[in-house]
Image (spheres, rainbow, N blue to C red):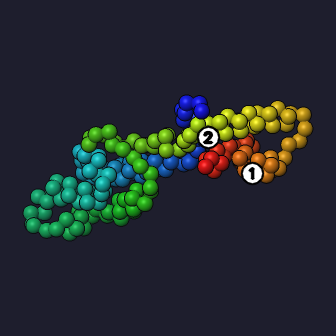
Amino acid sequence: MPKYKPMLIHFDEDGYNLAIKQSNERIHTYNQALEFASKHIEVDSPKTFGESFTAYFKEKFYESNRGKIGLEINVDKLLDLLDVDLTRLKRLEGNFLSNPAIIAYPDDNSAPLPNVDRNGYESYTTSSEQNEILRDARSLVEAIQRVGKHTTIYPYNIMQATSNLIGYDRRRNEYVINVQRRSS
């Protein structure tokens, strides 16, 4: 039996691109909240701000503005007295928290960056048997594509003839190999 070395079966480009898009949308929401907050307070810890926009805002706002009134009042009253409406910030926080994308803060003083691991969207063979199946299926796909230059090939008949070892992605107009379901 040949020595086993994992081979790339498939890269889920659509899933990867969606994850990048969601990360960028989450960062855009973060930047909108940061822009709103920066009009009233100094955000000196972007990571802490990202954990809870409104809690961080209220804490910093109270620290910097509690002396303006001269009375000991709670932060919500202070916000009302100084005519600061947090409705937009709360809405942005809701959007930010509902987005499942993963972002990372390089350090506590840095803005967030997308944190999408490409490896999570790649599938590899797990045995030498799968490697052999993958090589043979790729050879068959190459042969089908060569013959397809001379005649009409019906991809769904190929799928049926190979018991779905070779599938067909209609959106990309290309054959895909289903190695993982084939091995035992």
76 left or right of 153 in image: left
Query: Which percent across, then down, holds residue 76?
Result: 22, 68
Q: Image point 61% across, 40% down: which residue?
A: 130
Kindly identify the amino acid type of the residue bearing the numbered disc 2.
Gln
The secondary element bearing badge 2 is classed as helix
Q: Nearer the viewer, residue 176 or 81?
A: 176
Q: Nearer the viewer, residue 5 or 9?
A: 5
Residue 163 marker:
1
Q: Image point 44% across, 51% down: which residue?
A: 101
Who comes first in sequence, dot 2 or dot 1?
A: 2
Q: Is residue 172 visible?
A: no
Query: Which percent across, then down, holds residue 171?
Result: 71, 48
Quadrant of the snapshot with the N terminus:
top right
130 left or right of 150 in image: left
Q: Image point 26% across, 50% down: which residue?
A: 48
Query: Which percent across, then down, holds residue 84?
Result: 28, 62
Whether residue 176 is situated above or below residue 142 in the rendered picture = below
Q: Image point 80% across, 49% down: which residue?
A: 161
Quadrant of res 105: top left
Q: Which residue is mark 2?
A: 130
116 left or right of 160 in image: left
Q: Nearer the viewer, residue 69 or 113?
A: 113
Counting other residues with Cα less than 10 Å from the Cα at mark 2, is it few (<14), some (14-19), or many (20 or more)? Answer: many
The secondary element bearing badge 1 is classed as loop
The span from disc 2 to disc 1 (Cα, nearest Å) is: 16 Å
Q: Residue furthest top?
A: 3
Q: Is residue 117 visible?
A: yes
Kindly identify the amino acid type of the residue bearing the numbered disc 1.
Ser
